Structure formats: structure tokens, C-alpha cells
Amino acid sequence: VGAVLKMRAEDVYVQGRRTWLRLHEKGGKRHEMPAHHLLDEYLDAYLKVAGPEPKEHLFRTAKGRTGQLTDDAMTQADAYRMVRR
């Protein structure tokens, strides 16, 4: 979960016809993997709405119940609450 929450918008890229993800693990390890076709659709829709800059965090917190995204990255507790809902 930590590697996903650290992702920047530039870590999602298209190579050929596939969407790829770049994860930065502990100790400087880097994993690049193709996205599942459903994840590809979800990420495409999210990126169109969220529109983060390449250096911004990919998954950001929301400002209360306004639906506006902040510049702050989600924490593990935020992700856990989101999955529980």
C-alpha cells in the first residue's frame, strides 16, 4: 500500500498500447508492471477528472466533503478507510 500511495502522476505511463505502473519500494527498488485492463480504464477516468501535474501525488486527499482534491498525498489510514467503505 505504501508504494502505491507514494506514486506520482508520472509513474503511470503508456508504452505501446498498454498502461504501465512504476512503483518505488523500500530500499530504492523500482518495479514496473503492466496494468490490468480494468485498472487501465479506472486510472484513465481518474486522471481525466483529477488532472494531476506529473510531479504531484497520484492519489490525493479530498477537502472535506467538497470533492475537491488537495495537494496532500493519501495516508495509509486514508486508504484503509476508503477500502472499508
Image: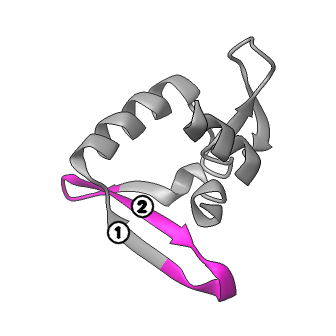
Its colouring scheme is one colour
Q: Is residue 50 above or below residue 7?
A: above
User: Residue at label 2?
Assistant: 21
Query: In the rendering, at what x and y percent does residue 82 appear?
Result: 61, 36
Asked whether disc 1 touches disc 2, contact meaning CB atoms under 8 Å apart, the reply is yes
Give the residue displayed 65% in from the left and 45% down from the top: 79
Q: Position of residue 17 (x, y in %)?
A: 18, 52
Q: Disc 2 on helix, strand or loop?
A: strand
What span is in magenta?
Answer: 14-30
- Quarter of the image containing the N terminus? bottom right
Q: Which mark is residue 33?
A: 1
Task: Examine the structure image and report whether residue 55 is included in the region drawn in magenta.
Answer: no
Q: CA distance from mark 1 to mark 2?
A: 5 Å
Residue 35 relative to residue 64: left or right: left
Assign the C terminus to one quadrant of the image. Answer: top right
**Closest to the observer: 11 or 33?**
33
